[in-house]
Image: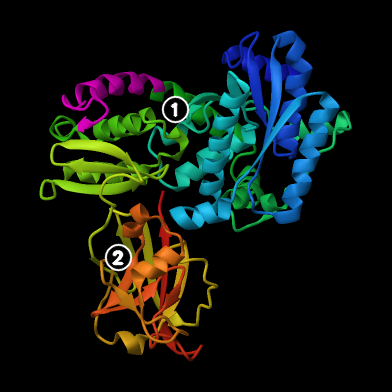
Amino acid sequence: MNAISRVRTTIRQHELIRPGQHVLVAVSGGADSVGLLHILNALARTLRIRLTLAHLNHGIRGATARTDESFVKHLARGLKLRCICGHSDVPRCARVSGVSLEMAAREARYRFLSRTAKRVGADLTATAHTADDQAETVLLKLARGAGPGGLTGIRYRIGIMGTVVVRPLLDTRRAELRCYLESGEIAWREDESNRNPAFLRNRVRRDVLPFLEEKLKPRIVTALIKTANVSREEDAWLDVIARTLLEECRSPRKKQSISVPLLGKHGVAARRRVIRLWLAGAGMDPDSIDFSAVERVDALVCNSRRTTGAVQVPGLLRAVRQYDVLSLKSGGKGTPARFRRLRVKIPGETIVTDAGLRIVASLRPGIIRERPAGAGSLPSKASVSLAAIGRKGVFVRSWRKGDRMRPLGLKGSRKIQDILVDAKVPGEQRGLVPLFECGSDIIWLPGYRIASGCEVSDNHVPALQLAVERIR
C-alpha cells in the first residue's frame, strides 16, 4: 500500500473528513507536513474537499524561520492554494507562563490554528502527526508515569480550543512519507531544532527508539501503536461512565463548577477521570492535561483542612476551590493563585504541588553562571554559598507584599514586586513565581539573580546547587 492509499484508508476508517468539507492544513515546511499537504491535495478531487494552508512563525529561529515561511508561501502558490501565515513570540510566552518552550509553542500553534480556522471558515484542521510520533508519545508518557488515559497517545480526531483537529497520517510511518516525497521529487525544509538533544522528544526519536528496535523488539513502534489503539478503545468506554459521574457532581448553583462533597465521595480513580473530563470540557487541550495537573486539582478536593485555595492547570487557567465549590478561572480574574511555604529538602527533591514545581537540591562543587532569562522564568538553576546558609534551612514560597532582596551585582535592595513588574510577569501569575529564602532573607529569584553575599567564589568548594522547573 502506498502513502496516498494508506492515508485514504485512515480517513475512511476513522471518518476524519467528509465530502464537501473545507480543511485547514497546518504546514511547517518540514517533510511530514509537506507530505500531508501533497497527499491531501492529490485526494482533494476524490474526497471533494477544499484546502487552505496555515503556517506559524514561532519567533524562535530568526532568519531560518522567515525562510521557512517564504518556502510555505511559495508551496501554496505552486498548488494554487490560499495560505495564512501568523507570528508568535513563543520564547516570551514560555518565560511569562513558566512552561517549557515546547509547551508554549504547542499552545501558540493551536491557538493560531483555531483562530485561522474560524477566520477562513474551515470545518476542521489537519496536522501531520505520524505513526512514529504516536510511538514516541506513548513511550514518553510511559516514562512520565501516565495512567490508562495517557497511553491512548495522539488521537485521530479531537477538539482543541474550539476547533476540530484530525491526524490523517497517524497510520503512516515517517520513512514512508520520505519515500513518497523523494519519488515525486518534492522539496521540503529541514528543521535543525529536530536534531537538538535539549528536547526530550528528539532524544527519544534519535537514541531511545532505535536502541529498543535493535536490542528489544524490531517492531517496537508497531507494538506501541497497538498499545495506544487498545488503550483508546477502553478509555472511550470508561469516559462514558465518567461523563455520567461528572454530571452528577455538577454544583447545583453553578453548572460549570464541581461540587466538592459530591466528587469527594468517589474513589481516587473515578475522581481523576472526572477531573480530566471537566478540564477538557472547559476547552483545554486534552493532550496537555497530564497526571500532575489532575493530581493538583484532586489535592484541592481532598484537603479537608483547607477549604479555599487555587492551583495552576494548563492553558493559563486556575482551578479554584471556594469551600464546597470547585471552579475554573482564567489567569486575569479572581484572587491570584499562591502556594504555601515549604522547606527545601537538601540534598533531594521537593515537589510543590500547589504551584506545580519540582525543586532539586544537591551539594557539590561548581558555579552555575546561568544567563538571566527574566525574573520568574523557568526552568532555572543557581549556585548558592553554603557559608551564607550556615545551619539555617532553605525555604520556597510565594511573593509577599513588601518583599525585598539585594540582587548580586546591583547596589542596594529592590522590591520583588518591582522586579516582577519590570519583567512583565502578569499580576495574576506573580504568586506562582518561587522565591527561595534563608532566615529572613530572599537568597534567589529564579530567572533573575541570587542575592548579594550568597555567591560562590571558588569553583572547587562544595556549594548548594538549586534547580527548579514546572511540572505539567
Q: Which residues are magenta?
A: 236-258
| Magenta stretch encompasses residue 246 | yes
| Residue annotated with mark 2 | 399
Q: Is residue 313 above or below residue 198?
A: above
- Judging by the rendered image, the residue that carries numbered circle 1 is 231
The picture places residue 192, in percent across and down from the top left corner, at: 72, 52
- Number of numbered discs visible in the structure rendering: 2
Task: Measuring from the top left, give residue 328's x and y in whole percent.
Answer: 30, 37
Q: CA–CA distance between discs 1 and 2?
A: 42 Å
Q: Is residue 358 left or right of residue 377?
A: left
Of discs 1 and 2, which sits in the foreground? 2
Percent x, y of residue 470: 41, 56
Query: Do the residues bearing badges 1 and 2 touch, measured as CB atoms within 8 Å?
Result: no
Q: Is residue 356 visible?
A: no
Residue name at image x 66 percent, y 56 percent: 196
Position above or below: 406 against 14:
below
The quarter of the displayed image where residue 286 is located: top left
Residue 322 occupies quadrant: top left
Q: Amino acid at mark 1?
A: Ser
Give the structural element (helix, strand or loop) at label 1.
helix
**Dot 2, crowdedness within 10 Å: few (<14), some or many (≥20)?**
many
Q: Amino acid at mark 2?
A: Trp
Rendered image quadrant of residue 127: top right
Of 111 and 215, the residue lying toward us: 111
Q: Report whether residue 394 is seen.
A: yes
